[in-house]
Amino acid sequence: MTLGLASPALAQSSPTTSAETYRLLNLFGDVFEQVKSKYVEEVDDKQLIEAAINGMLTSLDPHSSYLNMDNFEEMQVDTRGEFGGLGIEVTMEEGFVKVISPIYDTPAEKAGLQPGDFITHIDGKPIRGLGLNEAVEMMRGKVNTDIILTIMRKGETAPFDVTLTRAVIKIQSVRSEAKDDVGYIRITKFNEQTFSGLQRAITELRDQIGPEIKGLVIDMRNNPGGLLDQAISVSDAFLDKGEIVSTRPRDTENTERYNARPGDLADGLPMIVLINDGSASASEIVAGALQDHRRAVIMGTRSFGKGSVQTILPMPGNVALRLTTARYYTPSGKSIQEVGIVPDIIVPQARVESIEAAQRRSEADLNGALRNEDETISNAESDANDRRNAAEEIALEDYQLSRALDMIRGIALFAPRPQG
């Protein structure tokens, strides 16, 4: 009965919609012919059509775009962990290119570009009026050639120029370092090597620190995201059970849910995850999953807020569409789109300056002071001085990381100790 009532309505509306669609397609053909025949300079058919396709996609949202043959090949190289360029993740906003984040150890990062910077000119040519892909193409070029970007930055009274040298960008997406008794793991991007790199990092840190390891700091600041499956694998690495993320397309009946499997690479060690406004997409999936399951304390500042999933749709001719096909949600059902992940403990990055004008003084500095009878005290004091100096150095260089290390050690003080 329901099908019988619905069918006539569909039959009435479909021809009208189809007719309007064909009329607009004919209009496109007419405009194309006018441009081709009457534009002041001769134009290339392929460039015109590709620009029209890209315009259709970029009008949908900042992350959908057309990938021509060169762009498609570069995207494939990027997901493998190596590509050419400046090492900068960007989007389009208010007619300018906006920096999402510079990638660690790349020309963009070394030149001091920051999340939130706006690029207004490239080699003196204004960007306004260009599409995102066109602007990105202008920034690409031969390795070891220079490019000048004009930057507008919040807090600066006037735009300023930055000169960068293009390079082959080889991304080591995971690096690790022992910070005394705490394991530090930096994840710069989610590519095909990320999960295997995380496994190696944890193994190496356990070998370096040994059983005295207090916990892990996972640093995803300025991580622009990447592959969804790698974000799921990284989250799963620290979760024994429960949902990691769900992706919901237009047809919500096709919602996909990804769940954790038993096993925790960190064996329950306390964890701090560092994020900031340059943490986007896949890094927000990891932070959201670990936060909702209370597996880690999230520290830093609010993340970027990119809660959409892009699917690469290959097309004939070795080209592709990057199309936004779904939104993603944290295990608690929260959408991250526009609002981002709010840290459990908000710690803005700050510049710390030591106020100690002279070396620390103590009872031991006084003339005739009694000496401690414990012969091991000198070694213990030396170790304490080394740890204090290292902590002060980190605090001066990276205040957020210093706070994270302090918190890990504080949590470890109250963690259950093995009974002998």
Image (cartoon, grey):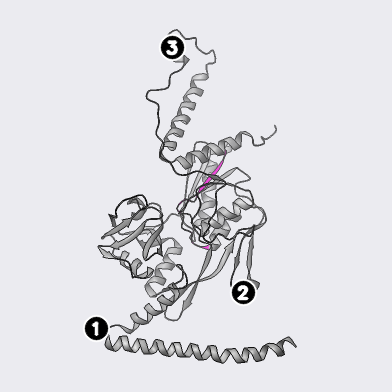
Helix, strand or loop at disc 3?
A: loop
Which residue is depicted at the point 28% across and 89% down?
Answer: 37
Instruction: Give the magenta part as a residue range.
Output: 213-227
* Amino acid at pointer 3: Leu
Per the image, the residue denoted by label 2 is 251
> Height in image: 417 above or below 129?
above
The residue at the far right in this view is 1
Helix, strand or loop at disc 2?
A: loop
* Amino acid at pointer 2: Asp
User: Tag count in the figure?
Assistant: 3
- Quarter holding residue 353: top left
- Between the residue at mark 2 and the residue at mark 1, the CA separation in whole angstroms equals 46 Å
Helix, strand or loop at disc 1?
A: loop
N-terminal of the pair, mark 3 or mark 2, is 2
The magenta stretch spans residue 222: yes
Tag 2: Cα neighbours inside 10 Å, few (<14), some, or many (≥20)?
few
Q: Are marks 3 and 2 in contact (CB under 8 Å)?
A: no
N-terminal of the pair, mark 1 or mark 3, is 1
The residue at the far front in this view is 157
Residue depth check, mark 1 versus mark 3: number of the one nearer the observer: 1
> Height in image: 363 above or below 195?
above
Which residue is depicted at the point 48% across and 38% down?
Answer: 402
Identify the main secondary structure in magenta: loop
Between 199 and 50, which is closer to the camera in this rendering? 50
Per the image, the residue denoted by label 1 is 40
Q: Quadrant of the C terminus?
A: top right
Q: Is residue 411 left or right of residue 164?
A: right
Q: Are marks 2 and 1 in contact (CB under 8 Å)?
A: no
